[in-house]
Amino acid sequence: MNMTMPIQTPQRAFAVGAPILELDSISLRFGGVKALTNISFNVLEHEIRAIIGPNGAGKSSMLNVINGVYVPQEGSIRFQGERLAAMTPTRAARMGIARTFQNIALFRGMSVLDNIMAGRTLHMHANFLEVAFRLPRARREETEAREKAEEIIEFLEIEHIRKTPVARLPYGLKKRVELGRALAAEPRILLLDEPMAGMNVEEKQDMCRFIIDVNDHYGTTIVLIEHDMGVVMDLSDRVVVLDYGKKIGDGTPAEVRANQDVINAYLGVAH
Amino acid sequence: MEDFRFFIEVLVGGLLSGLMYSLVALGFVLIYKASGVFNFAQGSMVFLAVLSFVGFMELGLPFWAALPVTIGMMVLVGMATERLVLRPLVGQSDTTLLMATIGLAFIIEGVAQIAWGVDVRRLDLGIHDEPIMWLADNFEILISQLDIAAGIVAGLMVVALALLFSRTKVGRGLRAVADDPAAALSIGIPLSHIWMLVWATAGVVALVAGMLWGARSGVQFALVLVALKALPVLIIGGFTSVPGVIVAGLIVGATEKVAEVYIGPYFGGGIEGWAPYMLAVLFLLVRPEGLFGEKIIRRV
């Protein structure tokens, strides 16, 4: 597919900076299955970094390692230069790593607004008793959370579905709400697991625009997984290519596109 | 006119005892909402809570000291249950969890009786099961003070918890955990805290329910059976709805009393015990998710 996207202007609000996340020699096995083998790459602050590869290449596993869902058998992760021993999803969230899921994981019974406000959890410190008795701090935090949620709702252009239970929304909007919930945490790094999977062209264009806007407006570092090459090439600053759990390419979209291993992996090789 | 006054008495009495069923059912809903577990031990928690309360008073604590001590104890019991019973079983099937709570019920009942003995005790809340004189004098309607007080306490408690769980971050956390634990973790909602909180709250709800029922019918083992009356309330109101619990409690309370008085004689009386279950069966046939429950949608 050849999509003509508004490619990022060279003048960006947040210039790409030093490495914020460094993955060194990560290996992950499930029993005898090698999901990831000796993978190293880094993510620079404020950049949009893509992880691509054919099905089963280990992209989601990679994201789950960064997010602490899986603990790799070998290798280390550094976040802002600090080596992390054991990552858990809760720790990742506390450090400012937010994520979306490949198969939308929204709170189905809750409204769009409540889903996004739930994303503020880590910014709300009032304890149970303060909340139960509506003490000043709990009230103030609730108001702040509401304001932030409204800001995000406006940013993502979903004002009209604010009070709708998410279970009723069409697929594309659910993905957008999930992005909103992740943004509500004001993350340093945003992990997007196939944000455009299953979308039609129009929805994909919208999502691309929002990803670029998030990066541009909040300066959020973005790591995204995608298998649609066209989308990735237009969107990302740099791309890591995985195949069968190994890294076969790393560089700017142009470099990756010219890489013979990558072409082989995507198009196959004559045997 | 005489008939109408009598009907009002029966109806109001039924509605008020219905609120007390709501309170017991609320304990079930809290835990079911957060962890999808039908907590068979809720009735035992009611029994343990009020028995301990009376026990502490027998040890010489005044009412206002025994209350916080018992609340503290129920919070600890709730937290221990989360830590020792539920957490090791995370990810097991619903049936496994249900069986675990049945086991828990026996343990709690046993421990309560070993600790405090098996005698039936009286609980005096300072409000007596006598008609309110003002109503009796002016309208010739006899309504028990205790019923009114219990109904008000139960109603307030249910409304307060309904607001807490629909309007605050605690409520959002609870619903989030119930809907998708993995996503809840990813936004930093600590699962174990939410579960502990819910079990502790269920423990406190059990104490209030136990005190109201204990004041009315004595603190005794039979309180465990009150939980069975919560079942039709849950089926009619929906397992996941706090407002549903109020409405269904009122329906069940009113139905059983009115049915007993007006339909009972045709069956030789005693239909109070099973009329609510008949109603629940009707609901299961017509609206299995309950009045306010989440619609059960199955994709084919």
Image (cartoon, rainbow, N blue to C red):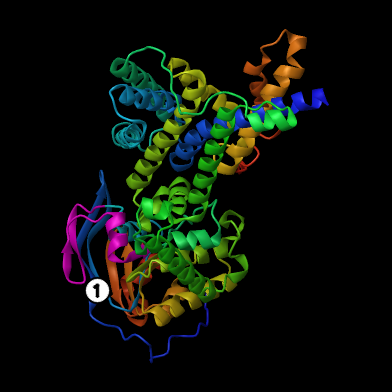
- Mark 1 crowd level (few <14, some 14–19, many ≥20, 10 Å Cα): some
The residue at the far bottom in this view is: A11
Q: Residue A123 occupies which quadrant of the picture?
A: bottom left
Q: Residue B283 occupies which quadrant of the picture?
A: top right
Residue at which label 1 appears: A20
On screen, residue B256 above or below B139: above
The answer to whether residue B189 is visible is yes
Residue B96: x and y in percent read 40, 28
Q: Nearer the viewer, residue B78 or B32?
A: B78
Q: Residue at x 37, y 77 (%)?
A: A257
Q: Nearer the viewer, residue A164 or B206?
A: B206
- Disc 1: which chain? A
Stretch of the chain drawn in magenta: A71-99
The answer to whether residue B284 is visible is no
Q: Residue B276 occupies which quadrant of the picture?
A: top right
Residue B157: x and y in percent read 50, 41
- Residue A112 is one of the magenta-drawn residues: no
Quarter of the image for the C terminus of chain A: give it: bottom left
Residue A48: x and y in percent read 36, 76
Q: Nearer the viewer, residue A210 or A271?
A: A210
* Circle 1: residue type: Ile
Q: What SS does tag 1 mark? A: strand
Tally of numbered tags: 1
Q: Nearer the viewer, residue B175 or B11?
A: B11
Q: Residue at x 53, y 42 (%)?
A: B156
On screen, residue A74 above or below B266: below
Residue B42: x and y in percent read 44, 28
The residue at the far right in this view is: B1
Q: Residue at x 35, y 61 (%)?
A: A122
The residue at the far top in this view is: B268
